[in-house]
Amino acid sequence: MGQLTQTRIAYRTLALTAGRHRGTRVAAGGVRLVSPRGVREYADPYAQSAVRRPFAHATWTSPPTIPGFAFNELVATWHAQTPDSSWVEVAARVRPARAAGWSGWLVLARWADNDTGLHPASVPVPADELTSVAADTVRVSGGAHAWQLRVTLLRPEPAAGDGPLLTYAGAMVSSVGSHARATSAPGSGAGRVLDVPAFSQRIHAGHCPQWGGGGEVWCSPTSIAMLLAYWGTGPDVDAISWVDPAYPDRTVYHAVRHCWDHAYGGAGNWSFNAAYAARFGLRTFVTRLRDLTEAETFIAAGIPLVASVIVDPAALAGADYGSEGHLVVLAGFTPDGDVVVNDPAAHNLATLRRVYARGDFERAWVGGSGGLVYVIHPPAVPLPARPAEPNW
């Protein structure tokens, strides 16, 4: 028996045709700005020269979603295209259990799919007695019963192109608590290991100081790059032409640059990483899984996962480092149900593929992050059957 984290989880994909359109409409496969509702001046605080520029804007607001339980965390997922210096602002609001109505709108991100027109950044939101935002996560004291997303689409004024296109929106809400339980039993993925290419974050140490200098802070985009390679996609030669040709695994640098959150100075923003992977035609989202038995259904379907773990080498036998928050690729399971991972923290590729005892890993993952994962797959590869309380 061990201390693991039990969660109530609900993931919802939002219908872009529903909700409230103010100056937007669904066209060309997503929500597009068609009739601006005003002009906002904005200066990118992370640009070398923070010049205020006018941007025409319009919004799409989702209908309220009621998950059926009181949740205390929300993580949003969005996919968007932002050509010609356009961008999107993503906000959420919740209906706290301890309040009579809705919270104010909590801005999660000012985001673009590149950093030439806007440096993507989460938005530090002052906490109040009920709500707070930690980069990519809305937290609610005392729980909330409903949520909404609002996406504002912005393009330079006068218009320099079609502006942004929002193609997907969804969110995961969860209620996290601890109790003692046994390690989950091996399931449908036992004995299957997926052939995920191996990339190490450590071999980039000292490179690109503007994005953290490689090494310690690149686990998330390095894991994303492994999954892109597994699915046979990723940036092409032209897209990585700016990367020093002497550097190894140059697609990792592309991922780091486009996942970088300029507000908190890291590449681990969950929403940014999911949005980055989506640009290559993949379906992506952030959710939680309840245990390794659920994770095995993805492996059985041929879908590797990126999992968030807290690493204590005294509790995770085989780990040669410690971390309060680390991302690994969950690539499969041994016949006995132990966990096979591609661990980007390895100092060389020969030690990157590792096997961790099932109970140890489950405690580091479910007990550490509440079972957080990126799910990334091509549209042609179906997800496993959803559980009764759907978390995908």
Image (cartoon, rainbow, N blue to C red):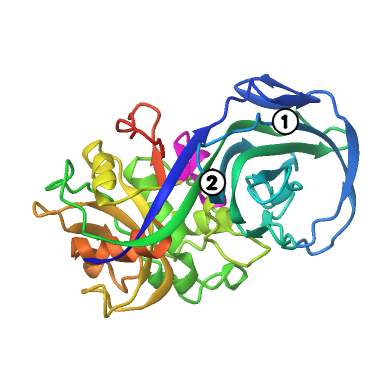
Q: Is residue 55 above or below residue 159?
A: below
Range drawn in magenta: 271-286
Query: Is residue 301 highlighted in magenta?
Result: no
Residue under label 1? 60
Residue 232: x and y in percent read 35, 40
Q: Amino acid at mark 1?
A: Trp
How many residues crowd mark 1 within 10 Å: few (<14), some (14–19), many (20+)? many
- The answer to whether one can see residue 371 in this image is no
Q: Which mark is residue 163?
A: none
- For image coordinates 73% across by 47% down, the residue present is 103
- The answer to whether one can see residue 272 in this image is yes
* Location of the C terminus (image quadrant): top left
Q: Quadrant of residue 179?
A: bottom left
How many residues crowd mark 2 within 10 Å: few (<14), some (14–19), many (20+)? many
- For image coordinates 17% across by 40% down, the residue present is 188
Q: Amino acid at mark 2?
A: Ala
Q: Is residue 19 above or below residue 138?
A: above
Of mark 2 and mark 1, the one earlier in the sequence is: 1
Residue under label 2? 70
Position of residue 310 in the picture relative to residue 333 (left or right)? right
- For image coordinates 21% across by 66% down, the residue present is 1
Number of marks: 2
Residue 108: x and y in percent read 67, 51
In-front residue for pair 37/96: 96
Position of residue 88 in the picture relative to residue 175 (left or right)? right
